[in-house]
Image (cartoon, rainbow, N blue to C red):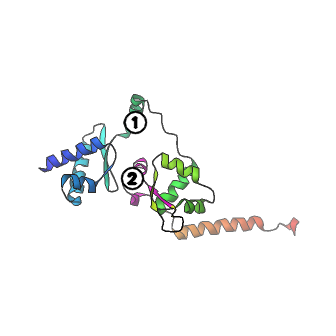
Amino acid sequence: MEIKEYKAAIEAILFANGEPIGADRLAELLELDEETVHRLAGDLMSEINTRGGGIMMVRLDEQYQLCTRKEYGDLIRRALDIRRNTPLSQAAMEVLAIVAYNQPVTKAFVEQVRGVDCSAVMQGLVQKNLIEECGRLELPGKPLLYGTTPVFLRSFGVSKLDELPPLPQKEEQARMVETTLEEVIDRAEPTENEE
């Protein structure tokens, strides 16, 4: 096959699949090495994304997918009679952040960080396909491990987890804790009337 045929084959596979497909799987199907697949897919992505049509190609970590452009979302929802997803609650965003920055994690870890039961929130995120089970921890009871999905990457507009904004540095966190402690101490100091 020529380069043009390989790119056409990748486009056809992505279109037919509908879901993200890994470079490893594309390499297997096309009988190429992964580096070549990434190069071909990158060229194809540039071609598709610069031609200005209603379809675009995205890279989600080591996977690729064809999808519609954001600006046509309302039209597509109306055409397919899809109700707009409700926004995530503050609790769901917190759980999602904990999973994204610490994955793979157990439900117990998430609950320890948040200090409350997270079963319902995590189940909701699994149903929205933002997180998924990704194995079991080798401890008694073998608790499930959770990680983010390609849908998470696509929803937040990043192609890999490295593109997530950095967490505050420890010095900043320490300063925030000190400030908070000072405020608590100031409020706790007795006034002249209490002495």
- Amino acid type assigned to the residue bearing label 2 in the image: Val
Rounded to the nearest angstrom, the CA distance separating label 1 from label 2 is 18 Å
> Is residue 72 depicted above or below 112 in this figure?
above
Q: Nearer the viewer, residue 168 or 93?
A: 93
28 sits to left or right of 195: left
In the rendered image, residue 21, in percent from the top left (x then y), is placed at 31, 50
Query: Residue at coordinates 53% horizontally, 70% vertically from top-left?
Result: 170
Q: Which residues make up the magenta segment?
A: 144-166
Mark 1 is surrounded, within 10 Å at the Cα level, by few (under 14), some (14 to 19) or many (20 or more) other residues, namely few
| Secondary structure found at label 1 | helix
In the rendered image, residue 156, in percent from the top left (x then y), is placed at 43, 50
Can the viewer see residue 124 in this picture?
A: yes
Q: Which residue is mark 1?
A: 73
| Secondary structure found at label 2 | loop
| Disc sitting over residue 158 in the figure | 2
Mark found first going from the N terminus, 1 or 2: 1
Corner quadrant of residue 134: bottom left
Quadrant where the C terminus lies? bottom right
> Is residue 84 depicted above or below 39 in this figure?
above
* Extreme residue toward the front, this view: 141
- Amino acid type assigned to the residue bearing label 1 in the image: Gly
Residue 147 falls within the magenta-colored stretch = yes
* Extreme residue toward the left, this view: 2
Mark 2 is surrounded, within 10 Å at the Cα level, by few (under 14), some (14 to 19) or many (20 or more) other residues, namely some
Residue 29 falls within the magenta-colored stretch = no
In the rendered image, residue 147, in percent from the top left (x then y), is placed at 45, 57
Query: Residue at coordinates 23% horizontally, 59% vertically from top-left?
Result: 34
In the rendered image, residue 57, in percent from the top left (x then y), is placed at 30, 46
